[in-house]
Image (cartoon, grey):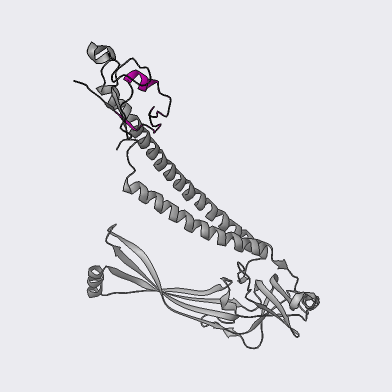
């Protein structure tokens, strides 16, 4: 294809795809940036004796987005690990995950694949208490499974490999799936583990509750990390999405610039084509017979001396000679009707 030709369908598809991907990445980036901004602006409250007085002075006895750090303490009963002795917690998650190899018909390779076949989560009510012993304040944690970052610790993990027979192996190769085994995992939020809670802090009578926030861009966190590490992780995620937006945005802008340049070159070639055709087909004025150049009838309306030898399109006027047409200022317009000249056709008189 010439550099000034029409853009191809593939180029339009590339522009559309890069624009859609850029819009999607920008939307995700905006959400991540809003979450990080809200997290950065969360109010840090010390879990101490003055907690209730701080909440009682707050509007509605509520802090919409607060950060509080403490240790996990069960309210009544605790959950015991099924595999580890003397391991107690308030949240227990049991997971069975199947691992297998799947044949890819495109790449002709075996790819690893995993699927959760069973998962059960058990919870009991628990509080956040100060790390120091003897403090009489506690924060009741509500709806812990709604947290986007639940700081569970893996206390047991075991892989049970499959032992297929010869018939099973043949069947697996024919079906394109080769089971590798089952992975059994137990995760727990242990009693006494440090926990950082970010959410809505409410004083309800004499009980302080931590619950999911209601504002836009505010997410509920129950993380085993401290607040500074949690904030740093969110800001790192924002930077990664920003780089992706810039990369794909640059690709979309480059595709658009390339298409606009091709359109400009094509239109410029179309505007230059009539003049090039006219130059190729014209003959010098002095080469025409003398009877064609003399006589007042049919003289050029500009110089009134040469014979009319040009047909201006699209208006269709025959009113000028070759030399006067070349002398017209850009953009060239018809001397009779002032319409812009798009093409010039050579006129031959016999």
- On the image, which quarter does residue 213 sit in? bottom right
Question: Residue 126 magenta-drawn?
Answer: no
Which image quarter is the C terminus in?
top left
Question: Residue 324 magenta-drawn?
Answer: yes
Residue 275 place in picture, x, y as percent: 32, 27
The residue nearer to you, when weighing 349 against 246, is 349
Residue 298 place in picture, x, y as percent: 29, 20
Residue 49 place in picture, x, y as percent: 80, 77
- Give the magenta part as a residue range: 321-344
State whether residue 93 is above or below residue 275. Answer: below
- On the image, which quarter does residue 145 sit in? bottom right
- On the image, which quarter does residue 256 sit in? top left
Residue drawn at x 35%, y 18% as measured from the top left: 323
State whether residue 328 is above or below residue 76. Answer: above
The residue nearer to you, when weighing 157 against 275, is 275
State whether residue 324 is above or below residue 57. Answer: above
Residue 211 place in picture, x, y as percent: 64, 77
Residue placed furthest toward the left: 350
The residue nearer to you, when weighing 23 against 349, is 349
For residue 322, side relative to residue 292 (left or right): right
Overall secondary structure of the magenta section: loop
Which image quarter is the N terminus in?
top left
Residue drawn at x 67%, y 74% as measured from the top left: 200
For residue 167, side relative to residue 236 (left or right): left
The residue nearer to you, when weighing 55 against 332, is 332
For residue 205, side relative to residue 346 (left or right): right
Residue drawn at x 62%, y 61% as measured from the top left: 36
Q: How many marks?
A: 0
């Amino acid at each position: 294809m010439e550099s000034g030709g029409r853009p191809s369908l593939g180029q339009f598809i590339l522009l559309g795809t890069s624009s859609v991907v850029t819009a999607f990445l920008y939307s995700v980036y905006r959400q991540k940036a809003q979450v990080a901004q809200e997290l950065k602006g969360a109010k840090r409250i010390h879990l101490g004796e003055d907690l209730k007085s701080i909440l009682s002075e707050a509007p509605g006895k509520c802090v919409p987005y607060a950060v509080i750090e403490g240790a996990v303490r069960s309210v009544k009963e605790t959950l015991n690990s099924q595999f580890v002795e003397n391991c107690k917690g308030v949240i227990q998650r049991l997971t069975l995950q199947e691992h297998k190899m799947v044949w890819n018909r495109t790449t002709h390779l075996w790819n690893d694949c995993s699927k959760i076949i069973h998962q059960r989560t058990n919870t009991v009510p628990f509080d956040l208490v100060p790390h120091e012993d003897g403090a009489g304040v506690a924060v009741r944690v509500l709806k812990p499974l709604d947290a986007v970052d639940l700081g569970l610790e893996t206390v047991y993990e075991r892989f049970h490999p499959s032992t297929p027979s010869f018939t099973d192996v043949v069947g697996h190769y024919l079906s394109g799936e080769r089971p590798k085994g089952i992975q059994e995992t137990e995760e727990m939020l242990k009693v006494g583990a440090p926990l950082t809670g970010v959410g809505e802090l409410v004083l309800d009578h004499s009980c302080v509750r931590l619950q999911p926030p209601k504002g836009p861009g505010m997410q509920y966190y129950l993380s085993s990390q401290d607040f500074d590490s949690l904030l740093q992780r969110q800001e790192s995620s924002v930077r990664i999405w920003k780089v992706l937006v810039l990369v794909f945005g640059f690709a979309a802008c480059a595709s658009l610039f390339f298409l606009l340049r091709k359109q400009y070159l094509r239109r410029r070639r179309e505007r230059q084509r009539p003049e090039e055709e006219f130059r190729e087909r014209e003959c010098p004025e002095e080469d025409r017979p003398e009877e064609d150049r003399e006589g007042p009838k049919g003289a050029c309306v500009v110089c009134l001396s040469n014979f009319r030898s040009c047909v201006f399109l699209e208006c269709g006027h025959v009113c000028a000679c070759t030399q006067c047409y070349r002398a017209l200022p850009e953009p060239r317009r018809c001397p009779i009707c002032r319409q812009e000249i798009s093409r010039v056709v050579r006129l031959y008189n016999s």
